[in-house]
Image (cartoon, helix red, strand yellow):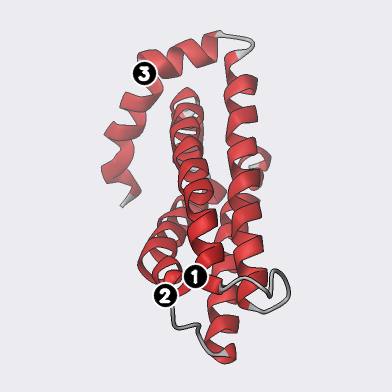
Amino acid sequence: MMQALLPFFKWCDGSAAGQAIRDSRVLFPIIESFHLFALTVLLGTVIVMNLRLLGAALRQQPVAQVARTLSPLTFWSMIVMLVTGFLLFASEAMKCYENPPFLFKMVALFVAIIFQYAVFGPMARSENAPGPGRAKTMVAASLILWFGVAISGRAIGFY
């Protein structure tokens, strides 16, 4: 599987953006700062939404209203995170090629995005609040996925 992706990794590593970021002393830390800020905003919206689903915060506001309010922040922080993440990846694509935490992060990110937009978001924005058992399951899955992305992202540098 990974062998089939090798040309893509080589292309990214040799791209003008990847080369420019590698050659600069300041681009990588600047891009990483935006990446981490976006991750912080994303995790903040996810945590607030999960606390509301559990009834532990913002109890006076309907779940759907909280979801609709947080949705743009979640979306735009994810966009910033994806763009900056790709730039960071391009600057060290060949280092990432055989990095298990990177592979885990990409799988977790893919699953987290699908879960967020196909399951969690529609359920949270629905006018029919989920029951306590379903809410706990959704919260657990959401937190495991998003914190899995964050923790594995941090682990990339240690491999």
Residue located 44% across and 40% down the image: 79
User: Label 3 belongs to which residue?
Assistant: 14
Q: Is 159 left or right of 7, judged from the image as shown?
A: right
Precedes in sequence: disc 1 or disc 3: 3
Would residue 157 be found to the left or right of residue 21 on screen?
right
Pointer 1 residue? 64
Local packing at callout 3 (Cα closer than 10 Å; few below 14, some 14-19, many 20+) is: some
Give the residue pinned by disc 2: 126
Image location of residue 55, percent across then percent down: 68, 79
In the rendered image of this protein, does residue 149 appear above or below residue 81? below
Q: Amino acid at mark 2?
A: Ser
Label 2 or label 1, whichever comes before in sequence order: 1
Determine whether the residue tagged by mark 2 lies in a helix, strand or loop: loop
Relative image position of residue 151 (x, y in whole percent): 65, 53
From the viewer's side, name the closer residue of 112 and 134. 134
Look at the picture and state if 151 lies above or below 6. below
Q: Position of residue 24 (x, y in %)?
A: 57, 9
Q: Quadrant of residue 115?
A: bottom left
Which amino acid lies under the numbered mark 1 shown in the image of this protein?
Ala
Distance between the alpha carbons at the discs numbered 2 and 1: 6 Å
